[in-house]
C-alpha cells in the first residue's frame, strides 16, 4: 500500500491518525502524521517534510493528505508533487483514512490512492435530515 502522510496545522494530523489507528490498527506503518506548529518557519517545515518523504518514497510512492487546499500545509506539500511518486489530496477527514483499510491489499499508484480517498471523503458528507428522509 502507498503510505499516507497527514499534514495539517496544530494537532489535527496527529488526532486523525490516532483515531484511524484506534478503528483500524492494521494501518500502523502505512499512516503517518506531521503537525505544523501554528508559528513556524516554512523553510524548516519543508525540510522536515522532505526528510519524511525521502523515507516514505523508499516504498514506491506516497500520498500527502492536507486539511484544505490553499492552506499552509497544502502550500508546503505542493512543491513535492511528482507524477507517479507523490500526490497531494486536500480536505482530509476520518472517512478518507478509514478507506485506507480497504485499499491495503491493492496495488494502486499514488494518484489512484488519492482519487479513492477523495471519493470516500466526498461520499461521507451528509445533511442528516435529508439523508434520513430518503
Image (tube, rainbow, N blue to C red):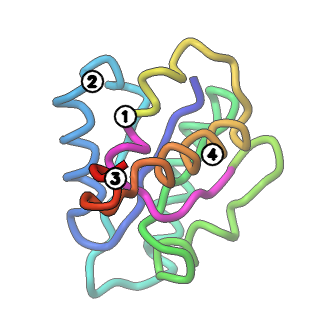
In the displayed structure, would residue 129 be above or below residue 23?
below
Q: Residue at x 26, y 83 (%)?
A: 38
Question: Alpha carbon of mark 2 to alpha carbon of mark 3: how far?
Answer: 26 Å
Q: Position of residue 16 (x, y in %)?
A: 26, 50
Which label's residue is closer to the chain start, 4 or 1? 1
Q: Position of residue 109 (x, y in %)?
A: 73, 32
Callout 2 touching callout 1 (CB < 8 Å): yes
Query: Residue at the top extreme?
Result: 105
Which label's residue is closer to the chain start, 2 or 4? 2
In the displayed structure, would residue 104 be above or below residue 52?
above
Q: Is residue 72 left or right of residue 24?
A: right
Question: Alpha carbon of mark 4 to alpha carbon of mark 3: how far?
Answer: 26 Å
Q: Which residue is mark 3?
A: 131
Question: Alpha carbon of mark 4 to alpha carbon of mark 1: how far?
Answer: 13 Å
Give the secondary structure at mark 3. helix
Callout 4 touching callout 1 (CB < 8 Å): no
Labelled disc at residue 98: 1
Which label's residue is closer to the chain start, 4 or 3? 4
Q: Which residue is mark 2?
A: 24
Q: Is residue 2 left or right of residue 52?
A: right
Per the rendered image, the range of residues in magenta is 87-97
Question: Alpha carbon of mark 1 to alpha carbon of mark 3: how far?
Answer: 21 Å
| 43 in magenta | no
Amino acid at each position: 500500500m502507498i503510505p499516507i502522510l497527514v499534514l495539517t496545522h496544530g494537532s489535527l494530523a496527529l488526532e486523525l491518525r490516532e483515531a484511524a489507528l484506534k478503528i483500524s490498527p492494521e494501518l500502523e506503518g502505512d499512516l503517518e502524521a506531521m503537525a505544523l506548529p501554528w508559528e513556524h518557519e516554512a523553510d524548516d517545515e519543508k525540510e522536515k517534510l522532505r526528510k519524511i518523504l525521502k523515507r516514505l518514497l523508499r516504498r514506491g510512492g506516497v500520498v500527502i493528505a492536507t486539511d484544505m487546499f490553499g492552506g499552509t500545509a497544502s502550500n508546503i506539500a505542493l512543491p513535492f508533487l511528482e507524477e507517479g511518486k507523490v500526490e497531494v489530496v486536500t480536505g482530509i477527514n476520518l472517512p478518507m483514512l478509514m478507506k485506507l483499510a480497504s485499499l491495503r491489499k491493492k496495488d494502486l499508484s499514488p494518484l489512484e490512492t488519492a482519487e479513492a480517498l477523495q471519493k470516500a471523503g466526498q461520499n461521507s458528507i451528509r445533511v442528516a435530515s435529508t439523508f434520513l428522509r430518503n
